[in-house]
Image (tube, grey):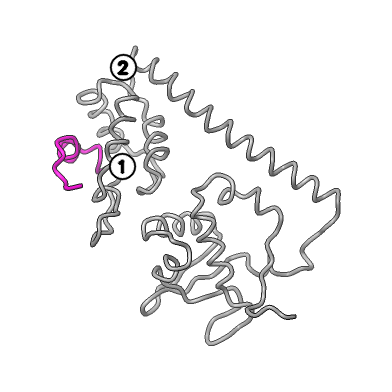
Amino acid sequence: MTIDGGAVWWARQTIESDIFSSKPDVWFKIWFYLVVSAKWRDDKGLKRGQCFMKYAWITENTGANRNEIDHCIRWLKRAKQIATLKATRGFVLTICNYEKFQDTNNYKSDTKSDTKSDIKATQKRQDTKEGEEGKKKRIQHTSSDTSKNGTCPYQEIVDLYHEILPELPEVLKITKPRKAQMKARWENDLKMDLEEYRRYFKFVREWPFLMGTKPGSTWRASLEWLTKEANFTKVIEEYYDR
């Protein structure tokens, strides 16, 4: 009996990867779909490891919304796992290490190495869990300390933003203008308390327009936008429709 559609290879070390162990579950579904969609040989203008793709196809096959897809693809590109090129009505996507992982000669399989891989995967999951718990404790501890000395904890605010609003644009650099806005909200509106920032970010989650999930809109708020005085006022005064 033969199975239609062919097959792709997945390394057992996949379970040690960040996208499997520490990113939103839907990201791995997206990644899996992209890999299995890639051509296994040169065909119709596409090279081995490439495919023509549309966001609509990804949504149809993974259930992910446009914001989840966009966030995942941007992360995959930064991680040098994929490259994209705009095309008419879609884009050409290249799996950067396709040749390496789809060549069976690159795989070593024995009990010792398999056991080692399992141990490493278990350790990584444990480290991730401990890391998240440690981050929460650090944020709570920092909240207490900074409330006493008044110092604005820029990195902890960014960590909270990423933790509570992972669908929104990622902050890659804490610039001076961003610091100024975070500090202004910290001192003037949020009582110099990280828990107030936490409550604010959780409040933002309740608004589809800000999260980019409102029908007919793909715009999403960013940390810079959320901490600007005029926008902050609109959010807390419930200016936008739910």
Tell me the residue that label 1 is attached to: 205
Label 2: how many residues lie within 10 Å, few (<14), some (14-19) or many (20+)?
A: some
Q: Is residue 166 left or right of residue 50?
A: left
Where is 66 relative to 241, above or below?
below
Q: Amino acid at mark 1?
A: Arg
The residue positioned 53% from the left and 87% from the top of the image is: 44
Mark 2 or 1, closer to the camera: 1
Q: Is residue 83 left or right of residue 155?
A: right
Total marks placed: 2
Percent from the top left, x then y, of residue 38?
Answer: 57, 73
Tell which residue pokes out farthest to the right in this image.
111
Tell me the element at label 2: loop
The residue positioned 39% from the left and 42% from the top of the image is: 173
Where is 6 relative to 17, above or below?
below
Q: Quadrant of the N terminus?
A: bottom right
Tell which residue pokes out farthest to the top in this image.
148
Q: Amino acid at mark 2?
A: Gly
Percent from the top left, x then y, of residue 128?
Answer: 58, 37
Look at the image and give the residue range highlighted in magenta.
225-242
Percent from the top left, x then y, of residue 147?
Answer: 33, 16
Tell me the residue that label 2 is attached to: 150
Place residue 175 in its image quadrant. top left
Magenta region includes residue 223? no
Label 1: how many residues lie within 10 Å, few (<14), some (14-19) or many (20+)?
A: some
The residue positioned 58% from the left and 67% from the top of the image is: 35
The reply to whether callout 2 and callout 1 are in contact (CB within 8 Å) is no
